[in-house]
Image: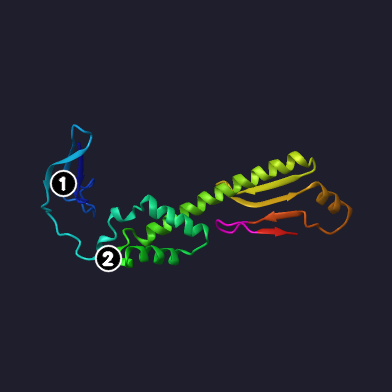
């Protein structure tokens, strides 16, 4: 059995709350058929409250926070190409015919973009450590140092290969084979000294 209910179904957890829950009886009750399909066993369509009349009110319901797999993939591809959030939102709006027909909020899109950025940053760190491990196996003088904040974010990453270390110790100038990364927000910028 599966029940699809109104967002105002059930009781508010606390007495003095701003909850929209008002025991709305509207529901669709689905039951399994013998062939593993579904059929509607009960349908109550009467609400005991007024419905949101405008798009501006409807867009804040929880259902508008969900971004389906296909739109999620589109957003990931656009973000990989460094398309900014406003343009991503406009492109998705063009797929739906207008901005009003986009089935999720711009805030939900922004949250998804933030999640994608965090995942990419974690992957970048993993790839960097793999490269450093490979360089270290080929160059016994290769060294690196990582400074991280308490929450695990990298603040500074410095490295030097063997030839760079030898050149640095023999002269007062730094060679191009010594570098460091100082990330700002979620992106890293490579700086060679």
The front one of 20 and 56 is: 56
User: Could you tell me how far apart the alpha carbons at marks 1 and 2 are, in whole angstroms?
Assistant: 24 Å
> Which residue ends up furthest to the top in the rendered image?
34
Residue 83 part of the magenta-drawn span:
no
Q: In front: mark 1 or mark 2?
A: 1
Image location (x, y in percent) of residue 98: 32, 68
Q: Which residue is mark 1?
A: 27
The front one of 135 and 24 is: 135
Which image quadrant: the N terminus? top left
Residue 188 part of the magenta-drawn span:
yes
Q: Which residue is mark 2?
A: 56
Classify 10 Å Cα crowding around label 1: few (below 14), some (14-19), many (20 and above).
some
Relative placement, left or right, of 30 versus 167 is left
Labelled pair 1, 2 in contact (Cβ < 8 Å): no
At horizontal 74% and vertical 39% (from top left) the residue drawn is 137
Main secondary structure found in the magenta portion: loop
The numbered mark at residue 38 is none
Relative placement, left or right, of 85 versus 178 is left
Image location (x, y in percent) of residue 27: 16, 46
Image location (x, y in percent) of residue 40: 15, 42
At horizontal 16% and vertical 45% (from top left) the residue drawn is 28
Tell me the SS state at disc 1: strand
Relative placement, left or right, of 178 versus 190 is right
Classify 10 Å Cα crowding around label 2: few (below 14), some (14-19), many (20 and above).
few
Which image quadrant: the C terminus? bottom right
Image location (x, y in percent) of residue 159: 73, 49
Q: Reading the chain from its start, which is encountered first: label 1 or label 2?
A: 1
> Which residue ends up furthest to the front in the rendered image?
35
| The magenta segment | 183-189
């Amino acid at each position: 059995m599966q029940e699809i209910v109104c967002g105002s179904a059930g009781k508010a957890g606390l007495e003095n709350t701003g909850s929209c829950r008002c025991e709305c009886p509207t529901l669709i009750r689905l039951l399994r058929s013998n062939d593993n399909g579904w059929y509607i066993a009960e349908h109550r369509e009467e609400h005991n409250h007024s419905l949101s009349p405008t798009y501006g009110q409807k867009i804040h319901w929880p259902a508008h926070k969900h971004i389906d797999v296909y739109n999620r993939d589109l957003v990931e591809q656009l973000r990989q190409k460094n398309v900014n959030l406003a343009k991503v939102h406009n492109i998705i709006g063009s797929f739906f015919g207008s901005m009003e027909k986009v089935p999720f909020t711009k805030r939900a899109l922004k949250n998804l973009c933030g999640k994608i950025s965090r995942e990419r940053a974690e992957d970048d760190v993993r790839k960097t450590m793999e490269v450093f491990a490979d360089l270290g196996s080929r160059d016994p003088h290769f060294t690196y140092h990582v400074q991280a904040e308490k929450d695990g974010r990298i603040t500074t990453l410095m490295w030097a290969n063997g030839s760079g270390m030898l050149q640095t110790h023999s002269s007062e100038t730094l060679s191009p084979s010594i570098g460091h990364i100082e990330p700002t927000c979620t992106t890293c910028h490579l700086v060679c000294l």
